[in-house]
Image (cartoon, rainbow, N blue to C red):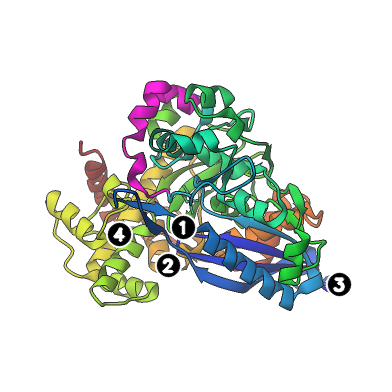
Amino acid sequence: MSDPVFLAVDLGAESGRVIAGRLVPAAADGAGADADGPTVTLEEVHRFPNGPIVVPGPDGSPSLRWDVTVLWREIETGLAKAGVRYSAEVVSVGVDTWGVDHVLLSETGELLGLPWNYRDDRTAGGFDEAFAAVPREEVFAGTGIQFLPFNSLYQLRATRRDHPELLSTAQRVLLMPDYFHRCLCGSEAVEFTNATTTQLVDPTTRDWNRGLIAKLDLPDRLFGPVVSPGTELGTLFPSLAQRTGLPESVKVVAPATHDTASAVAAIPTGSTGQADWAYISSGTWSLVGVETQGPVLGEAALAANVTNEGGVDGTSRLLKNVMGLWLVQGVRRSFARGGDELDYAELTRRAASAEGLVSLIDPDDARFLAPTDMAAEIVGYCRETGQPEPGDVAALVRCCLDSLALRYAAVLDELASLTGERPGVVHVVGGGSRNALLNQLTADACGVPVLAGPVEATALGNVLMQAKAAGAIGSLAELRAVVRRSEEVTRFDPTDDARWAEAADRLRGLSNRG
Ligand code: LFR
């Protein structure tokens, strides 16, 4: 019999994919790298673009949304391709996406409007409004989550303020992957790792913080059962199995549905729940963190504005969101508008030839969250802070990459002071780990080796959690051993350059500007 296939639906802010993962057992003759246990192979079945759509409101004002109907059509197309290619070999399917965004469902299960995209500005001012109901300290103590304006907490409060009829009609809130699981099999469960990104889950009980939900005056009935990653949610709807050519026996299994949680699960390390290694899950966002065995709460964690997101096998992800390659994506869009279409490899090649550490930005300045023109925004920032204005695309991208590397180093310092342990190595995973220049700059800024790869960490984590649910893998440690046997990593050693210390001071000055 051929090796089982697990289908990962992995949706990102720029593209979505359906990926088939195959778990290949250890070589029977006990020879080769895979002698100790199974390996995994991935095959991309379907890829499609994704991005926010603009829906004009009654007064014409733009509202940023996700078109879940189109996303579902693409998912179904991908499943049908998998039906043709693998048919009876498919064991299960699971979905992961970015965090925080969600749909509201009516009593009869109708979708109540298109979900908002988290970059919509309706949550600006949301902190003050929410903290009037529940003080900031209390929100942190009860959730352990970083204060980001787009967390579901502030989004739901914005919906309550602007569209009270939606909240009074809604019976259920489902995060994006949960919604697609419902389309696959009817499940209305909310998966734990992604639920934590709402800032409404208690990190100790690992369930909704119903006291907080009540104080925020959000309807309690919206928040359904929370399930652990690896939970079997059901089997494909027979009609969907028929349309896609997949067997009716295909299970729907919740992976770690938060893309970052799946990526962290697939880090090729030999250690779990220890803060002696760090990770950067690098894509549109850079999630810079360490794995811990429980939440790190208290005053210092609150002051550092770190997050404790839920991980697999009882682990926590102590991390911070850094603006990430969104900056470079934005610069790319700015130049594309001017007719200059450049791919990411070309942008990085140009940045490598530009002089380093000239002008710096604080990547996490709110002005870079959703600017209309990223290149102009960066030039404006440099002008206002008395630095040379980046004059071309090479200088702009170099400014982004230098600044990101410095910001990573600053976050690692903050995390080390919270855990009392300094990571000896940084694993960079995800699409951004392809960027050799950024990897080298990261090693230089952080002063420790960077191990880059796998690029497909999220899809690997998704597939392997399904394999774990099927009983083919026993633990998170074993899951990571499968990744180590299957994927090459590239090492970047820090170069000794005193300019980084000076640049770190400059970035600190910029970040501390009032
Ligand atoms: C990365 C990610 C981050 C989350 C951001 C918004 O794709 O999931 O972890 O903070 O998107 O949801």
Type of the residue with mark 1: Ser
Mark 3 C-beta closer than 8 Å to ligand 1: no
Q: Which mark is residue 400?
A: 4
- Of badges 2 and 3, nearer the viewer stands 2
Type of the residue with mark 3: Ala
Mark 1 C-beta closer than 8 Å to ligand 1: no
- Of badges 3 and 1, nearer the viewer stands 1
Q: Residue tagged by mark 2?
A: 435
Distance, label 3 to label 1, CA atoms, is 36 Å
Distance, label 2 to label 1, CA atoms, is 10 Å
Name the quarter where the C terminus is drawn: top left
Q: Earlier in the sequence, mark 4 or mark 1?
A: 1
Distance, label 4 to label 2, CA atoms, is 13 Å
Numbered disc 3: secondary structure: loop
User: Dot 3: within a 10 Å radius of its alpha carbon, few (fewer than 14), some, or many (20 or more) residues?
Assistant: few
User: Which residue occupies 46% across, 59% down?
Assistant: 13
